[in-house]
Image (spheres, rainbow, N blue to C red):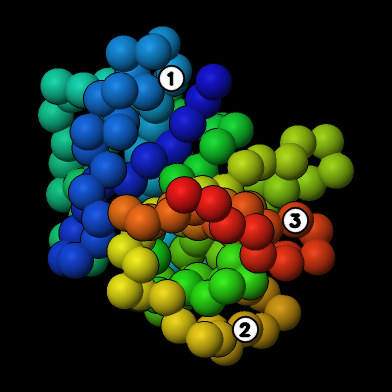
């Protein structure tokens, strides 16, 4: 399966051990790249040990010679989230634009937010361009959200 992760910055939860495990299970991994300020993210293939280059906002990205990939699963970092699958990031709207562009009638992607339970808020302000997540996983539990975005949880 094609899975997009991310290289953690600032206080984002470090998913690199998860990426190593997914790679060892045979999944194709990719990381996001910023193409332009108002554009959706693109994804380039990445494997453990590959060198990364500096990107905007202190991010690290796969080299431009790595193939572009359209992931089936997108793992998304969280600054905060609520019990309906809404998330806050760093305010650039990159993931909302990207998830909106990747989801279409022919190919529904799976979105998984990862963060810490302490980042849970009662509600997140949303507008028409915000995209709620399918799953949110923290160190304490997971939450699955359906079409109605009603939270189910288990541990």
Quick one: 13 or 151, which is closer to the camera? Answer: 151
Mark in front: 3 vs 2: 3
Foreground residue, 73 or 43?
A: 73
Q: Residue furthest right?
A: 105
Residue 97 visible to an observer of this rendering = no
- Residue at 72% of width from left, 79% of height from top? 128
Residue position for label 1: 28
Residue displayed at 55% across by 37% down: 73
As drawn, the label of residue 146 is 3
x then y, percent, for residue 99: 61, 54
Q: Observer-nearest residue: 126 or 33?
A: 126
Expressed as whole percent of the image width and height from the top left, the position of residue 50 reads: 18, 24
Q: What element carries label 1?
A: strand
Q: What element carries label 3?
A: loop
Give the residue pinned by disc 2.
126
3 or 2: tag closer to the N-terminus = 2
Say which residue appears at 37% left-offset and 23% top-offset: 22
Indicate which disc, 3 or 1, sits on the residue closer to the N terminus: 1
Instruction: State how far apart marks 3 and 2 are (Cα).
Output: 17 Å
Apparent side of residue 145 relative to residue 3 in the rendered image (left or right) = right
Q: Which quadrant, please, contains the N terminus? A: top right
Q: Is residue 40 left or right of residue 116?
A: right
Q: How far apart are marks 3 and 1 (CA)?
A: 26 Å
Q: Quadrant of residue 151?
A: bottom right
Label 1 or label 2, whichever comes before in sequence order: 1
């Amino acid at each position: 399966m094609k899975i997009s992760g991310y290289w953690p910055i600032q206080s984002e939860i470090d998913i690199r051990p998860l990426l190593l495990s997914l790679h060892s299970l045979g999944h194709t991994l990719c990381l996001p790249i910023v193409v332009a300020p108002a554009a959706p993210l693109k994804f380039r293939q990445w494997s453990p040990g590959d060198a990364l280059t500096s990107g905007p906002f202190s991010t690290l990205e796969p080299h431009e010679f790595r193939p572009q990939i359209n992931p089936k699963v997108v793992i998304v970092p969280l600054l905060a989230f609520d019990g309906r699958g809404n998330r806050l990031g760093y305010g650039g709207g990159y993931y909302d634009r990207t998830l909106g562009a990747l989801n279409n009638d022919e190919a529904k992607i799976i979105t998984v937010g990862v963060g810490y339970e302490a980042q849970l808020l009662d509600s997140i302000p949303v507008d028409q361009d915000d995209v709620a997540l399918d799953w949110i996983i923290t160190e304490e539990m997971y939450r699955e959200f359906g079409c109605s975005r009603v939270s189910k949880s288990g541990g």
